[in-house]
Structure formats: structure tokens, C-alpha cells
Image (tube, grey):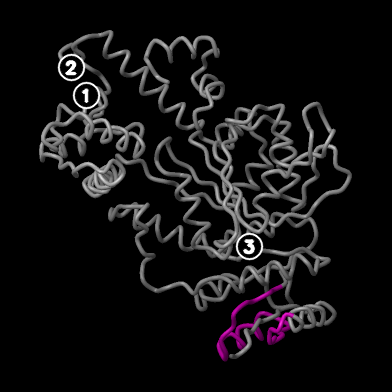
Amino acid sequence: MSRQKALIVDDEPDIRELLEITLGRMKLDTRSARNVKEAREYLAREPFDLCLTDMRLPDGTGLELVQHIQQRHPQVPVAMITAFGSLDTAVNALKAGAFDFVTKPVDLGRLRELVNTALRLRTPDAEEAPIDNRLLGDSPPMRLMRNQIAKLARSQAPVYISGESGSGKELVARLIHEQGPRSEATFVPVNCGAIPSELMESEFFGHRKGSFTGAVEDKLGLFQAANGGTLFLDEVADLPLPMQVKLLRAIQEKAVRAVGGQQEVAVDVRILCATHKDLAAEVAAGRFRQDLYYRLNVIELRVPPLRERREDIPLLTESVLRRLASDSGLPAARISADALEKLKNYRFPGNVRELENMLERAYTLCEDDLIQPHDLRLAESASADGSGQATLAQIGNLEDYLEDIERKLIMQALEETRWNRTAAAQRLGLTFRSMRYRLKKLGID
């Protein structure tokens, strides 16, 4: 079996020698170039499995080489070597398509991790990324998003996944993880809005026995749990400012210190984050640190709301009904043409999650295994005409109408916070006492 091959691009002989020795011990063949011109000549002559390039070169920049490789040799992952503290340079390299970066002086342990991760990358297929049965849809926005997921899976850049509640942001994060070189390691999702502020540092970084009341044994944090894999920070906008400072340091230093611990522990984690809020607006309002925003938002991936891909609704509906039948062991239900048309004309403020909940309710209520329009119990006020106004004829009974809206919003808040009632109450701007009263009134267990 032929050995894998790396291209090293640096004008400093000592750095080239260090990288050649390190990669040689990892059983890689190496070729060394002193400038952009020599690197391009090597790339044109022979195939490579990896490229390591310095940022500053005599006849150009490493950034130019990253862009050249992206255009001519997209199968080759390229990592940037940057001066210590040049975070802006590293971020620009990631945005241009670099796989990852390492700073000078080069930490050999970090370098070996980077190389091993890069060599686990799958070769990109010229065809469109395959349709995952959890990410259904053949609309243009979905085809675009699948291609973006495939590209982002080949990078280690932090990704900010934006999108409305219920649109599938966590699923997108899982697919980026599963299609990337960390797929064999752990994917750790955490809802930042569901962790009490006083426990956040312990949850993220772990704690030592006796470090605070109730710390009866050592505990690993989420960063250590995700070591080698991916940490997905959902609803990251809900992090309090003091925790944002600590998170920024952990990301920059690639190390964490447990509460009560004396030593920092190195961690190798890819960070993905999401929120349904406008993170730029949170920065402008002073609720989110600008430096953390730029560190997390290296690349933004927008998940389209369901109303922007209505042509996917029949396929999604069929899939959900098939799953409901499989889970319940009951006969599969069909949906009438009129009911399907109603779904296609509905705005879905709760997106795919709302469609799933709506179909589950209709599946339970329908007669003769056929879902009719009345089984859907659509809120006509949110129809696709965009007026947002319900008429008296559409409302019928005002108490029932308002109760239905209240129930939907409370259920949405509970689902987003994984049924943490305290966090759901905060999301809705309610006291816990008021939340408990409403749950009892609406019969929500």
C-alpha cells in the first residue's frame, strides 16, 4: 500500500525540516516547497493527501495558495501555519477554504492531531451530496444546503447555524459532524438556555471533588466529553456574559480548567453553534460579546424555514406518516388532496417541528386512516396569504382560539428547552409559578 503524501510550503529551512521529520515519523512521504510557485508546480505534477503552508511566502501568501488549491485541487485539505496571535489571519484562511490552522511556534502534538484528522477526510464526490433520510427535500434551498453541509464537513472551521425554531438546526449540525473526519468520535449537543447560570462553568469544564457544596466526586465537563469530536452549542445567544468570556478563552486556547482544578487540560473539539435569535443584533445590543461572535461565526450556514421550501411538504408529510405508522404499529394513514393543499398553503411558524406535531395529532384523530383538512386544525390566521389577521368567522370561539395559541407556544418552548420548565418559563417571560398554573390549566403534563 503506497504511503500518503504531504506538501510542505515554507521559506524557513528550520520549519520545513521540523515538519518533514514530524510527518516522516507519522509514515508520510513529504515534498517541500519554498514559495507559491514551487508549490503550484508540485501540485500540478503529483497528487497529495495534505498541504501545510506558511502564511507569508516570498512570492505571495498562503491565502493565495489556499484559494488556488480550492479551485484546482479541492480534494487536498490545506492547513495554514500562522504567527502566534494572528487570529484574524487564521479566520480568513478558514473562510477561504483552509481545513484548519496551527500557530507558530508549532506545537507538535497539535500538529499530529491536525494531520490525523485531515487524513481521515473523505474524498469529495463530484456529484451532489447524497440525500440523508433525515434531511428530506428536493427544493433548491435544500439542494444548496446539502452541498454546503458536505463542504463544511471537510473543514474544522467553527460554523454558526442560523434559522428559526423548529427548522432543524441540530440535525444540520449532526450531519456536518457525521460527514466529517470526526464522525467516529462523539457529537455532544448542549442547550445553553437550559443550564442554570450558576452551574454553567461546571457543566462546560467539569469540576474537582470538593470544589463546591455538592461536588462529591470529580466530573468531566462537556468539552472533555466532546474531546476528539464535535461540541454543538444550541441557543448560544442565551449564554450569560461572564460565561461568554470563559468560553472564548477555552476556544482560543484549546484548553479548559475544571472548577477547583489547578491545571489546564488540552482539548481537541470542533465547535458548531446555533440560535434562533439574530446574533448580530444581540452583539449590537450588548448582550453578546463581539469577539466571541467573530470566533464562532467564521462561516454562517442558514437553515431555510419551511415556508421557503413548500414543494418539500408532500415528501416530508409522507415520511412523517410512515414513521408514525412504524412507531405505533397501526396501519399507515393517507392524507387527502385537500388536506395536503392546506398544508402547502400554511405558513408554519414552527417549521418542520410544527408539521410533525400537526401530523401526529391528525394521525390520532382521523377516521378510516385518511387525514382530512379538519383533522389538521390549522390556525387559519397564519395562512400563506401573509395577512396574519384572523377574522371572527375563522376564530369561532375566542377562548378556544387563544387557548390553542397559548398551548402551541408553551409546547414549543418546552421542546426547545428539552422540557426544562424553568428554562421554558424564562423563554416565555413568565415566572415559574405562572408557568405551572398555565400547564395545569391546559392539561400539559
Q: Residue at x 40, y 55 (%)?
A: 145
Q: Nearer the viewer, mark 1 or mark 3?
A: 1
Q: Which amino acid type is marked by label 1? A: Glu
Label 3–label 2 contact, CB within 8 A? no
Q: Which amino acid type is marked by label 2? A: Gln
Local secondary structure at mark 3: helix
Q: Nearer the viewer, mark 3 or mark 2?
A: 2
Mark 1 Cα within 10 Å, few/some/many (few <14, many 20+)? some
Q: Residue at x 57, y 52 (%)?
A: 187
Local secondary structure at mark 2: helix
Identify the residue under disc 1: 380
Q: Is residue 275 left or right of residue 286?
A: left
Local secondary structure at mark 1: helix
Is residue 177 a member of the stretch shown in magenta? no
Q: Is residue 351 left or right of residue 203?
A: left
Q: Is residue 434 left or right of residue 215?
A: left
Q: Which amino acid type is marked by label 3? A: Ala
Label 1–label 2 contact, CB within 8 A? yes
The answer to whether 397 is drawn above or below residue 194 in the figure is above
Name the spot of residue 302 as percent of width and height, x first.
45, 47
Name the spot of residue 218 as percent of width and height, x first.
78, 41
Give the residues drawn in magenta, as a range: 26-53
Name the spot of residue 244 as percent of width and height, x first.
69, 36
Is residue 38 a member of the stretch shown in magenta? yes
Identify the residue under disc 3: 93
**Mark 3–mark 2 distance (CA, rounded to whole Å):** 55 Å
Q: What label sits on residue 394 in the rendered view?
A: 2
The answer to whether 34 is drawn above or below residue 422 in the figure is below
